[in-house]
């Protein structure tokens, strides 16, 4: 199974920060930092579909928070 860096290297992705109250928004778009293995947040919103369309990010690059019992 590929690790995190192999899956997201050089590609933008969206993280779901959970269903709690987030003043800026529930979803964050992460973009690769040039000449680095890192990513940075470039936009936060409550509209997942709008951000997926705006940044052309497919559903397999949306990361969800999973809470364990």
Image: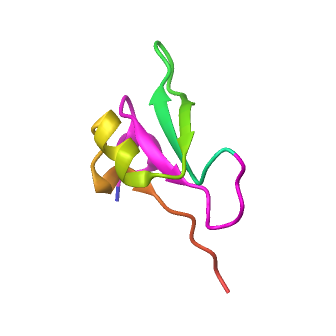
Q: Is residue 58 left or right of residue 49?
A: left
Magenta range is 2-23
Residue 22 in the image, given as x and y percentages of width and height: 70, 54
Measuring 27% from the left and 38% from the top, which residue is drawn there? Answer: 56
Residue 65 in the image, given as x and y percentages of width and height: 57, 65
Q: Is residue 5 left or right of residue 40?
A: left
Q: By what rule are the colours in the image chosen? A: rainbow
- The quadrant in which the N terminus is found is bottom left
Q: Is residue 43 left or right of residue 2?
A: right
Above or below 61: residue 66:
below
Measuring 27% from the left and 49% from the top, which residue is drawn there? Answer: 58
Choose between 8 and 53: the one closer to the eye: 53
Above or below 15: residue 19:
below
Classify residue 52 by image quadrant: top left
Above or below 67: residue 55:
above
Residue 34 in the image, given as x and y percentages of width and height: 46, 14
| Name of the residue lying farthest toward the top | 35
Residue 62 forms part of the magenta stretch: no
Measuring 42% from the left and 53% from the top, which residue is drawn there? Answer: 48
Residue 20 forms part of the magenta stretch: yes
- The quadrant in which the C terminus is found is bottom right
Q: How many marks?
A: 0
């Amino acid at each position: 199974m590929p690790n995190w860096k192999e899956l997201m290297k050089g590609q933008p992705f969206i993280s779901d920060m959970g269903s709690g109250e987030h003043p800026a928004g529930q979803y964050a778009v992460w973009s690769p930092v040039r000449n680095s293995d890192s990513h940075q947040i470039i936009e936060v919103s409550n509209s997942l579909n709008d951000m997926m369309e705006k940044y052309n990010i497919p559903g397999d690059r949306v990361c969800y928070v999973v809470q364990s019992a």
